[in-house]
Amino acid sequence: MYVCICRQVTDHQIRDICRGGANSFSDVQAKTGVASDCGKCGKLAQTIVKEFSKSPDFVNAA
């Protein structure tokens, strides 16, 4: 699903970036540009990053 239509960023891309080592919304934003145009996607993108950081895949990676 598209999270950011302005930058064509999907939820899968955000999760892949988190799996690749990004551990904060600002890391994801720097890599994708999400929430840097209209900003309407910011809350959803932040939620995805937070949910991923609480998932077993992320916790076990540390």
Image (spheres, rainbow, N blue to C red):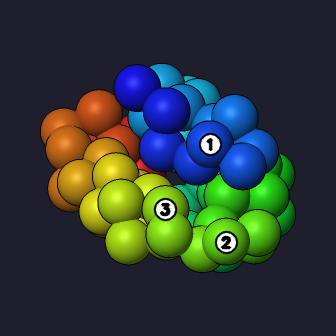
Q: Regarding mark 2 in the picture, which secondary structure is present there?
A: loop
Q: Are marks 3 and 1 in contact (CB under 8 Å)?
A: yes
Q: Is 60 or 49 nearer to us in this picture?
A: 49
Say whether residue 52 is left or right of residue 16. left
* Quarter placement of the N terminus: top left
Q: Which residue is mark 2?
A: 38
Real-space Cα separation, disc 2 to disc 1, in angstroms? 10 Å
Q: Residue at x 75, y 45 (%)?
A: 7
Residue 41: mark: 3
Q: Earlier in the sequence, mark 2 or mark 1?
A: 1
Say whether residue 8 is left or right of residue 53. right
Image height of 34 relative to 10, above or below:
below
Image height of 13 relative to 56, above or below:
above
Residue 43: mark: none
The three-letter amino acid code for the residue at tag 3 is Cys
Q: Are marks 3 and 2 in contact (CB under 8 Å)?
A: yes
The quarter holding residue 14 reads top right
Real-space Cα separation, disc 3 to disc 1, in angstroms? 8 Å
Instruction: Give the class, few, some or many, for how many residues have Cα within 10 Å of label 2's Cα (few <14, many ≥20).
Output: few
Real-space Cα separation, disc 3 to disc 2, in angstroms? 8 Å
Q: Residue at x 20, y 44 (%)?
A: 55
Place of residue 26 in the rendered image (x, y in percent of width and height, measured from the top left):
66, 74
Place of residue 15 in the rendered image (x, y in percent of width and height, measured from the top left):
47, 35
Q: Do we see residue 15 in this rendering?
A: no
Front: mark 3 or 2: 2
Image height of 1 relative to 33, above or below:
above
Q: Regarding mark 1 in the picture, which secondary structure is present there?
A: loop
Q: Residue at x 72, y 49 (%)?
A: 6
The three-letter amino acid code for the residue at tag 2 is Cys
The quarter holding residue 49 reads bottom left
Q: Residue at x 62, y 42 (%)?
A: 5
Q: Which residue is mark 1?
A: 5
